[in-house]
Amino acid sequence: MRKIGTALLIVVTAAALTACTGQNNAPAPTPSASSTGPIYPDLDQFTPAPEGLIDEDSGETHGPRPVPTWDDESRESATAAAVAVMTAYARPDLPFEQWWAGLQPLLDNKATQDYAYMDPARIVATSVTGPAVITDDTSAYVAFVDVPTNAGTYGVVLSRADADSPWLAGRFILPEGVN
């Protein structure tokens, strides 16, 4: 009985192997006269992949950003940004919608959330009274700037994403004694 089982196993294995390596009656493809090697697609017909990193949230491509440094141009743009944002902020006589429309584009994302529900009537300053002064320039990405107003000197914290990005306000620091 054992010999029949072994013989049957050999016959089944041989039949399976024969089926796997069966004859292929289809003719082999013939290379064309113009092909001398592997055929590759014309890559010029495709849009190239974007360079840089792709932001998962927005789908935008971000490449390397220029690193900021403190130079005369950076200092001038930081003080000008502080005066501009303080001028937009110190308008307590405006209705909220008008006040917000002037201020919001000068704020970073966090400040936009923080000041979105502020009542401008609570602001005591109404005008900038002198030049802005950078008080801390430890980082070329962040500037602490004092801006004198008719209600005292406000501190404005500015930041920028890179050397080509504008300075945006992140925080207003009230003068001492002002709530």
Image (cartoon, rainbow, N blue to C red):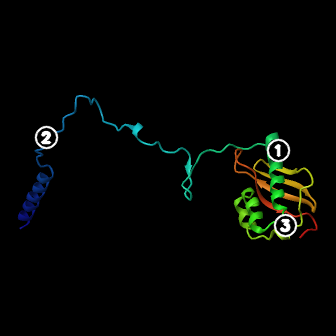
Q: Quadrant of residue 101?
A: bottom right
In this image, 110 relative to 61: left or right?
A: right
Q: CA distance from mark 2 to mark 3?
A: 88 Å
Do callouts 2 and 3 mark residues in contact (Cβ within 8 Å)? no
Do callouts 1 and 2 mark residues in contact (Cβ within 8 Å)? no
**Which residue is painted at 91% across and 63% down in the image?**
175
Counting residues from the start of the chain, the first of labels 3 and 1 encountered is: 1
**Which residue is painted at 18% across and 38% down in the image?**
29
Q: CA distance from mark 3 to mark 1?
A: 29 Å
Q: Quadrant of residue 144?
A: bottom right
**Which residue is painted at 79% across and 61% down in the image?**
171
Rendered view: 127 above or below 117: above
Counting residues from the start of the chain, the first of labels 1 and 2 encountered is: 2
User: Where is residue 26 shown, x and y percent of the image?
Assistant: 13, 44
Disc number placed over residue 27 in the picture, else none: 2
Rendered view: 159 above or below 27: below
Disc 1 marks a residue whose amino acid type is Glu
Disc 2 marks a residue whose amino acid type is Pro
Disc number placed over residue 85 in the picture, else none: none
User: Where is residue 120 shown, x and y percent of the image?
Assistant: 81, 68
Rendered view: 27 above or below 84: above
Disc 3 marks a residue whose amino acid type is Asp
Residue on which the image places disc 1: 76
Q: Quadrant of the C terminus?
A: bottom right
Label 2: which secondary element: loop
In this image, 169 relative to 126: left or right?
A: left
Classify mark 3: residues with Cα within 10 Å, few (<14), some (14-19) or many (20+): few
Is residue 71 in view? Answer: no
Label 3: which secondary element: loop
Tell which of 108 and 136 is nearer to you.
108
Disc number placed over residue 93 in the picture, else none: 3
